[in-house]
Each structure stands twice: as structure tokens, then as C-alpha cells.
Amino acid sequence: MSVSNAQTSLVDRAPQFVHSKPVRDGRTRNNKVRYALTVLAFLLPSAVPLLLFVLGPMVAAAWVSLNQWNLLAPMKWVGLGNYAKLLGDPITGDVFLHTVYYIVGYLPLVYIGGLALALALNTALKGRSFLRGIYFLPVVTSWIVVALVWRWLLSPSNGIVNSALAFFGIHGPGWWTDPHWAMPSIIIASAWKDLGFIMVILLAGLQAIPSDMYDAAKVDGAGWWRRLFSVTLPLLSPSSFFVLVISLINGFQVFDQVYAMTGGGPNGASEVVVQQIYDLTFRYGRAGEASALSWMLFVVVLAVTVIQIRGQKRWVTYA
Amino acid sequence: MPDATLAMSRGFSTKAPRSREANLRLAGVIVLHAVIILGAVAMFFPFLWTIITSLTPGASLTNTPALIPANPSLGAYQQLFVERPFAQVILNSFVLAAITTVVQLVTSSTAAYAFSRLPFRGQTAVFGVYLATMMIPLQVLIVPLFVELKTFGLLDTYLGALLPTFASAFGIFLLRQAINQVPRELDEAATLDGAGHFRIFTGIILPNIRPAIATLVVFAFMGSWNSFLWPLVVLRSPELQTLPIALAGLQGQYTSQWDVIMAGSVISVLPMLALYIFAQKYVIQGVASSGIK
Amino acid sequence: MNRKLMVAIGLAGVAALAMTGCASGTPSSGGPVTITYSNFISNGGNEKNLATIVAAFEKKNPDIKVDVKTLPYDSYGTALQTDLAAGTPADVFDINGPSSYGPYQANGVLAELKGVDSGVYNTALLDSYATDGKQYALPTSFSDVVLYYNKDLFDAAGVKYPTSDWTWADETAAAAKLTDKAAGVWGDHQPVTYNEYYKVLVQNGASFLTKDGKKAAFNTPAGIEAAKWLVDKSGTTMPTIADGQGTADFDTNLFKDGKLAMLHTGIWVFSAFADAPANWDIAVEPGNKTSANAVFSNGIGVSATSKHPAQAQKWAEFMSASDTMVNVRLDSGWELPAISDAKKLATYLDKGKPTNRQAVFDAAKKIAAAPSIGDNQSAMQDAITGELIEAQAGRESVQQALDNAEKKINALLAG
């Protein structure tokens, strides 16, 4: 199989979101019922818990979003009042802006870094199993500890980073103490922590690539870069697609690192959507607004995800 | 990529006359190793710092950490296991994480199979709903979920802590992507042999997505092992307490013992690290032995 | 294999539903009554001390059992709010100070405590858990903020030790003399936060809110002077944010290392300083126009929905006023009981460093009352701290910061 053959055979596989008619002709009614039961049997174990314990509470939250509620006194119906109030509050725009800023900085950094790491640690390096373990360490370390370390590394006056910059004659910024640098500080620490997470997923994807693909490419005389772009990346695209969708969904819900590193400060400069949701619910006694804000976030994340799913046809190839 | 390294390692082993190309390759290998190892040091450093702090009695935070503690002591660990019930707490977390992992493997792999191999009307929409379950932050679901579990009478029970973790859209999506990469020729061959969906699922699909399954094992376990908010509100009895909550309990209202907190962090990280290394080994062996690759 | 597992999951679901029937609500017939007590105060090292108090209570009241649930301090509010929202609060629960008490009382979450022997308690602290003359919670302990000073640094600089007669001017003059940036020694440290600001306002004869509590009252010349008192230390006699000021344990470490001459902080760091090499002592904080001190207390309340309010109140009183509690707390150094009887507290005065422990009680005699505005309390505190830090970092003038804070807080007060 040559590379070009592999490519064409990949192209004529229908992407999974485009389906031909579900039930083909010639099936008896009995067969249809059996098929439906099979589908149900495969779906129910996951559908029941998701319905009961996620979708149910989501609907409840939607209802809460139409009420004024401080969690203590009975709810008071306000209709769409919470949404109107949020839309009129400049903080809402701020927290969405900060969240998007986070994603725009974080995603390219962590994806390219994670991909490079996965490629490097998929080679026959000595002790790669150990090295993978090391790179996975930050993923399993709690944000409390990671934030302490990074606040110290990025300490404006005596941190390692600014000391190193000073060595090259650069006056380092105030990092997390400076409103303009608070979010970049969070982005750097987050990318550092999540690098191993992306690596693990992409490594699993790399290991699933049949080695005869590479053999074929080599017979064709393809060099390293050509093999990367014509074999590795196309065959890794389902994993990359997964990483991007998940990272965006998680990125919009960034919270732990902000809470641990800056608490949203200085003076709200790094306050993100979910932090505002948490504060509104548990600290400010405005659970109705928190639910409304969650649903606004939901709409944004859903839209972004739908765009990604629609767009996957252009670049995601399945075996 | 794997073959690229083969070529690279050949640059080391064979004593062929050094061409310019071989020199370049050698330089590449050296740079690669240097970068990877430097990166690993950067990754390892905070953990090292955690260990050192855990061995320093009365450790404080803002001082530049010493590489060798002044009076190293295992006192912090002793406090955790002798004066505090951390053995019990770790066991609790382990049991919950193990159950969550096993159940998620079942619910994720079956759903992933349905989304990859069982076309039905509205499949895309249903999958979209599944993904949507990840899009509302937990913080706002906690109260409704708590009220729901109260009506089920499951507050302060392990079942109450576990039920919401039984299905994960993350795991389903992860495995669906993996199953999509398994060549359909394999299913078709099995169908010709008269295999039904359950047999294809267990006999063909599952063995072929071992790397993804190992990944899910690690993440499902980690998700439960580190989960904080839900166990915090649903589990109240001291004997049911899990590790992250016990760790948070080490920070006082006004002051904190950082050596004990860091010791707690070390013992919470080590099992996850071991699980990951084990899972990696298993994947590589599995890939090598299944031969289908 | 899969079918079996699926069957198992199905069974688990059925079991869950079955448990619904039997798990909830088991009213005790005869036997001792069990009350639940949800707390954070014992968290982080005093769990055993609490157990001792519980054992003494149960011995004295064989018909009552106390089921203790301890939560991390940081997350206690989240868990309690969830409980209150779902109607499942413990019979007795901790209250994180009068500022948390306000919203709970206003929303009818707390049962009125009748027949409490008010003479046992420190009056000011007891009153901070009462509304319209009715008692809704009891103070279990208190701490206050005092001025720590390093005697060695004072001696070396030839500066006289602080006394209770000091004013801000005395402190400023001493701090300037004590600061030696070349040697890394700082003269003073006081956090730039809401908790300091409402107090220094009172010290300067101003107040945070208007008398009727409907508007911010700090944006006045006296209020600006108070804000400058905090903000202007930064970079002159106190390390800046860039130096690490404001991060966890920064100030206490600096003091422990002998690099800080004066420190405004709570009495909760006594034990942390016990083995500090330097000679140190404490004094009541200097005032400006008057002396006023920040006192923090923890409270204990009975849920309005408790099925055993009488027994619950008995425990709340025992936990806040019994001799057992007083002795356990004093012996272990677990904060100070909020009781009135000075004789019972006398042993505290000879518990070792610092020498001038009398200052702890003196400070508690002149309390700067913390403003309490109900549901928006946390939002108000966040707003003022955020703006003060802007001024401290030099990104805003003090006047701008207070203008902004006033605007935000008036908006919160207007609802």
C-alpha cells in the first residue's frame, strides 16, 4: 500500500457524523426491532446515569435560572430577569473575555507542546517509560501544590523566571501580581500542568497507527517531515479532534487554576466565568444568576463544539 | 515516527563512515535527548519540592526551598498515618476510584460502540446530547444533584457518591474516537463468520482499542481519586471521607502545617503515577502481542 | 460478560431505589437522642480536643449523643449552603463569624435560643450573634489582632517598645527608623484588606457604612487618611506585592526570620512563633483618634428545622460556655473561649510567650464592629480589598480606589 493509496482509502470512508440510511432495505420488522433493542442495550448503561445525574440537574438549573434564590430562603420567580441582569452587568462581559483569552493562549501552547512531547516519547528513547511518568506527574498533582510552586517560580522580585530574565538584562514583569500578566501566568502554569494529559491521549493515538503505514511510506522514499504530514498527522487526526473538543469544553470551564493562582485578581483582572458562577452561588447568595450564567456559558460552548463537529469533515480522517 | 528513531538509533550503533547526514542525525538525537531531559527536570522539580517540604518539620512556604532539608524527618508522614486516619481515607478513595473506573469502562465502551458501529436515526443528535453533559459546570449542578440524592435517600452513602460518576461523556468520546480508527474490514469479516454485535464488540473491538482503554482507566481513576466538590457535600461521616477532602482538612482557619500538607500531596500523587506507568506497560505489551496492529 | 455487568448495574439501580425507602428518617424510639454537629473549628488539628468535649457532654447528658461531622474550613461554607438549600442542615452547626451569621439569621435558618445565661459570655461577642434583642447563635471562641514586635530589632535601632498609648504617628516614626532595606529588614507589616480597613476607619474616627447601613461612608477625608495609612506603608516600611507581600505566610515567615520589626496579625500565630529565635512581644494596636480592634469570633447555632431543638441548644451552650470546653481550649491553646469570667481565663496569661498576654484581653475591650450587610457581604469584602490593592500597587490613586469601591458597594447595598 503506498501513501497515496492509503490516502484515497481514507477519504472514501464516510465521516461518522454523516450516515447512510440507518436501516438498510430488506430488513424484516422483526429484525428492525432486534436491531433497535441492540442499540438500546449498548446505550442504556450510559444513558441512564447521564439522564438521572447530569441532564436532570441541568434542567433543574435551568429552572433555578428563572428564579431569584440565595439558597436559604424560598425561590422567587423572576422569569428572564437574571439573564437581563447578567447581560447588563459589565462583569459578565469581562469574565467571558478573560475566559476566551485563557483559551486562546492555552490551547495552541498545550496542543503543540503535547504533540511534540508525544512524538518524542513515542520514539525508542532510553527510559521513555520513566520519562513519560515524569511528564505525567504534574497532571496528577493538585492545583494547590502546582499553584504554590508557580507563584514562587513567577514571583516578581525573587522568582527563578525573573532572575533568569534579569541575567539576560530583561526586567521581568509582575506576573500574577500585575493585571496584564495575571492571565499569561495562569496560561503558562496550566499548559505546563496539562502537557502530560495531551501527551497521554496523543500517545495512545500514535500507538494505534499501524506500522505498515510507515513501512509503505518509507518504501516510497518519504522523509521524516513528509511522513509526519502524510501519515502521522492524518492518522492521528481523530485523537487530535478529541483533544481539541475536550480542551475547548474544559477551557471554557477553567476554574481551579485561577482560584489557586490569583483568586481572580488582581482586582478581578483574571476572573473567569466559572469562578463567577461559584462566587454567585456559594458566596454572593445569587444562585439564580449563577444558573443563568451557566446556561449562557452552555450556549457558547455548545456553539463552539457544533462548529468543530461540522468542521471535522475537512481534516479528520477515520480508518 | 517510530522508524525515524530506528534510523536515529542506527546512527549510534553502526560504525559506518560518518557522512554529513549521519552527523546531522547524531546532532538531532543529542538535541532531542537534551530537550526531553531538561523538560523532565522542569516537570519533576515541583514534585521534588513537595517531597523536600514534606520532610522539613515546620516548613514554611515563601523561603527558597533548600535542596537538602535541614533536619529531615518523617514526622509529617507519621502524623498522617498515626495521628490521622489516612490509611482509612486512602482505602476509601481507592475503593471509590476502582468502582468508578470499572463501571465507566463498561458504560463508555458500550456507548462508544453504539456511536461508532450501530447507525440509528438521530445518532448525531444523541451524541451531541452526550457531549452537552460536559458543558455545564459542576458548581451549578451540585445543589440540584444534592436535592435529588436526598430524595433517593442516598446522602452520606458511597452509592450516592458513586452514581453521578457512572457514565462519562469524556470516556465515551475517547473510546468512540478509538473505535472509529479500527478498520471496518475486521467487523465485516466477523459478520461473515456469523458473529453478532456482542461478539464483535468483545472479540474484535475491545482488544483493538487497548491503548485507549488504558488511557481511560488512568483518567477515570484519576477523576475519582482527585474529585473534591461532590464527595465533599455528599459524604459527611468521618469514616466515609476521601483523600482530597482529608487533604483540604489539613489547612486550618488561620494557619497550616505545610510539611503535613505536602506529605499528603506526595501520598496522593504516588498511586496515580504507579497506575499510569503500569497502564503504559500494559498497553505496549498489548499492542505488541495482539498482532492486529 | 457484558450482559452480566449490565445486569449488575441494573440491580445496583434497583438497590438504590430500595434504599430510598429505608434510609431516610429513623426517629428514635426511647433510647438516647442523637443530634448532629457540623463543624469546621476542630478541623486542622483540634479534632481530638473536640472529641474530649463531646465525651464530657455525653457523660453529663446520657440521653443525648452528638454525631460530629468535621469539614475543611475552606469548603465549610459550600457544604453548609448546600445543606441549607436542600433542607438537610445538621441540628447544630458552626457559623463563621458575625458576617456569616447576618444572612443566616435574616433568612430564618437559625432557631431562636431562649433562656441563654447571657452573663456567662463576653457581652460584645454575644451581642454580635443577636438580632432585635433575640439570641440566634452563641460565640464559641474569639481571636483578636494585635501588634507583634521584635525586641531585638527595636533594641538595635534604639527605638522604644510600643505601648498601648501609641498612635499611628508613633508607629510610622518607629517603622521608618527600624526599616533597613539594605539589610532586608522591614519596619512594619499590615495587610491591605477589608478586614484591616474597616478597623482602621474606626481607629480614625470614621466608619465603613452610614449609621442606617444603607450607604458607604468611607469616602471621606478621614476614610482616605485611613486607606493611606494602610497603602502608604507598602514600599516604604513594608515590602511590596512584588516582594511577595500578601502571599500565604509571607509576613509571619519574615517576622520569624527576624527581618520584620512590627507585624499586625492575629493571636493565632502565637504557637507558630513559639520557637522563633528572636525576643518578641505584643501590644495593643495603636489607634489614631481612638483605639479600636478587630475581633474575630466563631459562632454556633441551632438549625430552625432541628427535630431536637432543646437537646441541640444544650450542646450549643456546652460547646460555648462549659468549664470542660474552657479547660480543653486553654490547655491545648485552641483559641480563646468567649466567656466573661476573667478568673477562668487567668491561666492563659502565664502560658509562655508572649509576655504581655494581657494585651489580648485589653484589645477585646474596644472592638471595631464589622459591618454586616446580609447576602452581599462577601461581594462587598471582595470589592473593597480589590480596590485597596489597586491603590497599593500604584495602579490607582487612593482617591480613585475609594471612588470605585464606593460605587460598587452602594450598588450592592441598593440590591
Image (cartoon, coloured by chain):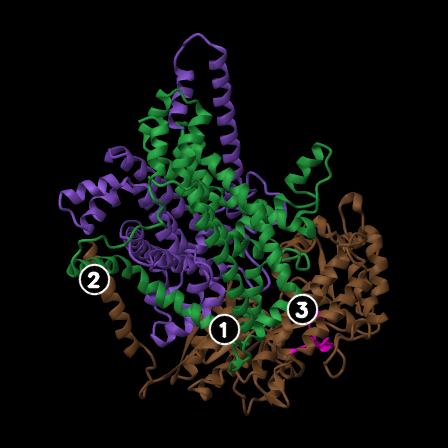
Chain colours: A green, B purple, C brown
What residue is pinned by disc 1?
C80
In space, the residues marked 3 and 2 are separated at their CA atoms by: 53 Å
What residue is pinned by disc 2?
C7
Residue toward you, A76 or C384? A76
Q: Is residue A106 above or below residue C116?
A: above
Mark 1 and mark 2 lie on one chain; the one further toward the N terminus is: 2
Inspect the magenta stretch and tell me whether residue A104 lies in it.
no
Name which residue lies at 34% across and 49% down: B176
Residue C166 located left or right of residue B47: right
Task: Work out whether residue B44 can be spotted.
Answer: no
Camera-side mark, 3 or 2: 2
Q: Tell me which amino acid carries mark 1.
A: Leu
Task: Work out whether residue A179 can be spotted.
Answer: yes
In space, the residues marked 1 and 2 are separated at their CA atoms by: 37 Å
In space, the residues marked 1 and 3 are separated at their CA atoms by: 20 Å
Discs 1 and 2 lie in a common subunit: yes
The residue sitting at the left extreme is B194
Q: Tell me which amino acid carries mark 2.
A: Val
Q: Tell me which amino acid carries mark 3.
A: Gln
Instruction: Give the magenta part as a residue range.
Output: C359-373
Name which residue lies at 62% across and 85% down: C130
Name which residue lies at 42% across and 86% down: C307
Inspect the magenta stretch and tell me whether residue C361 lies in it.
yes
What residue is pinned by disc 3?
C381
Residue B184 pos. (x, y %): 26, 41
Residue A96 pos. (x, y %): 59, 58
Residue B178 occupies quadrant: top left
